[in-house]
Amino acid sequence: MTGKAKPKKHTAKEIQAKVDAATTNRGGGKAGLADRSGIEKGGHAKFECPHCKITAPDVKSMQIHHDAKHPKIPFDETKISNLHVSVATATVAESSKPRPGVRGSHKK
């Protein structure tokens, strides 16, 4: 017969992983919306596709997106809009705002 061993309910490692997952900012949801959009704090989304308005962090990622989603239109790097250009002047004046964080939390 098998299955006679009783498993432990919860290990300390598993509980610590749950606490870490609950208190770490992963950049999702409403809190991460500003990070992804790049509007207020200069988030991770730097470039915007001129055709479908999707955002990407760098030119290489935008080129991969363009080749996959818009194969009939030739890729032109000059048409890509940089979202951080307008944000950069505002963040210089207000440098007290926290930068977008992928890890870290204010909750403990």
Image (cartoon, grey):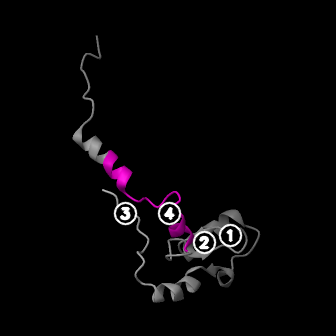
> How far from the left and from the top, in percent, is residue 97?
42, 78
Answer whether labels 2 and 1 touch (C-beta < 8 Å). Answer: no
| Helix, strand or loop for disc 2 | helix
Label 1 belongs to which residue? 53
Give 57 or 8, whichever is nearer the viewer: 8
**Which of the 4 quarters of the picture holds residue 98?**
bottom left
Residue 45 is tagged as none
Q: Which residues are magenta?
A: 18-38
In the displayed structure, would residue 85 be above or below residue 21? Answer: below
Mark nearer the N terminus (4 vs 2):
4
Q: Say which label, 1 or 4, has the lower sequence index.
A: 4
**Which kind of residue does numbered mark 1 sit on?**
Lys
Measured Cα–Cα span from mark 3 to mark 2: 24 Å
Q: Are marks 4 and 3 in contact (CB under 8 Å)?
A: no
The three-letter code of the residue at mark 4 reads Gly
Q: Residue furthest right?
A: 72
State the image quarter where residue 15 is shown: top left
Closer to the N terminus: mark 4 or mark 3? 4
Q: Quadrant of the C terminus?
A: bottom left
First in sequence: mark 2 vs mark 1 = 1
Q: Is 71 displayed left or right of 1 in the figure?
A: right
Indicate whether residue 77 is drawn in magenta: no
- Under tag 4, what secondary structure? loop
